[in-house]
Amino acid sequence: MNTWSDPVAAKPQSALAARLRPVALAGNLLYFLFVLHNGLEERFRGTRVEQVAGIGALFLFTLNLVLISRRPAWRFPGRRPSRTHIKNTDAMIRRNFLTHAAAALVITLLCGLIYVTVQQNYRMSANDPQLQQARDMARQLGSGRSLQSLVPSDSVDLRESLGLFRGIYDSGGKPIACNGYLEGKPAPIPAGVFTRAGSQGEDAVTWQPRRGIRMALVVEAARLPGTGFAVAGRSLAEVERRIDNLGWMVFLVWLACLILIGLHGFLTHRRQEDSRPGSPVARPS
């Protein structure tokens, strides 16, 4: 009869080590996420030594997680696993893999849904002040208010300011009165925005006049002789910063969930293997 033999048998794990093992796993995982979060938040900026130290720490934490998750087991002479055992083991491995892959897919879809939902809420909410201002200006123009009373005298530098600017444009898209300036000139709104606002009555768009300058812009059709459109806009810098932070937070949660799912799948697989009758790593009863 063929038997497995192992001249070196590992000592059994102590009760204290068994209790400390999950604590060590959780601590390493939390500290790994803490270092990763700080690195991503700072875009891994710093000196070359600091960058190498940060990446090296992540590698060491990952290696430590893998080593801690490896459970030692006694090895004793035993019968070679039968074909049935091998088939059962293969089926068990497939089920374990499919279950955890499905969990990872669900987590990925949920995190994606959360990100898209909150991101769209942030972006659409950025239009609210401009919608109110543009609609009020269009209505007040219809009631006979003067252009000077609707457009503030304080100028807004679109490159530097986060403030809201307002403007009145004629039917051809040329500014009549505007307090938003870019490089010393009134905000040059694209002609296509006026075309769509003229056909739909209103248009809300993300406008990027220059690299690094993005505006939440609302154009309202006034439909008055000599006056075509009321315009209101403001910078998206703060909104996009919040969206970036949201993306990093969702990414870290997604990564943490995948790591936990992977560790659980790995440990479940080892536990199932060790408990199989005839397995060369099974503990004696």
Image: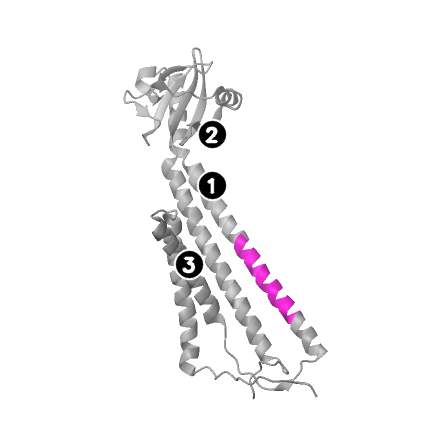
Residue at 63% of width from left, 67% of height from top?
95
Task: Assign a secondary structure to mark 1.
Answer: helix
For disc 3, the marked residue is 58
Mark-to-mark CA distance, 3 and 2? 41 Å
Looking at the image, tell me whether mark 3 or mark 1 is earlier in sequence order: 3
Residue reaching furthest to the left: 154
The disc label shown at residue 205, or none: 2
Looking at the image, tell me whether mark 3 or mark 2 is earlier in sequence order: 3
Q: In the image, residue 161 lies at what x, y percent?
A: 31, 30
Compared with 57, 149 (above or below) is above
Q: Is residue 4 magenta?
A: no
For disc 1, the marked residue is 120
Task: Assign a secondary structure to mark 2.
Answer: strand
Q: Is residue 98 magenta?
A: yes
For label 3, the crowd category at 10 Å Cα-Cα, with few meaning under 14, some 14 to 19 and many 20 or more, is some
Q: In the image, residue 144 lies at what x, y percent?
A: 36, 15
Amino acid at pointer 1:
Gln
Quadrant location of the C terminus? bottom right
Looking at the image, tell me whether mark 1 or mark 2 is earlier in sequence order: 1
Task: Assign a secondary structure to mark 3.
Answer: helix
Quadrant location of the N terminus? bottom right
Span highlighted in magenta in the image: 91-108
Mark-to-mark CA distance, 1 and 2? 13 Å
Return the residue nearer the eye: 29 or 77: 77
Q: Are marks 1 and 2 in contact (CB under 8 Å)?
A: no
Q: In the image, residue 81 lies at what x, y percent?
A: 67, 80
Q: Nearer the viewer, mark 3 or mark 2?
A: 3
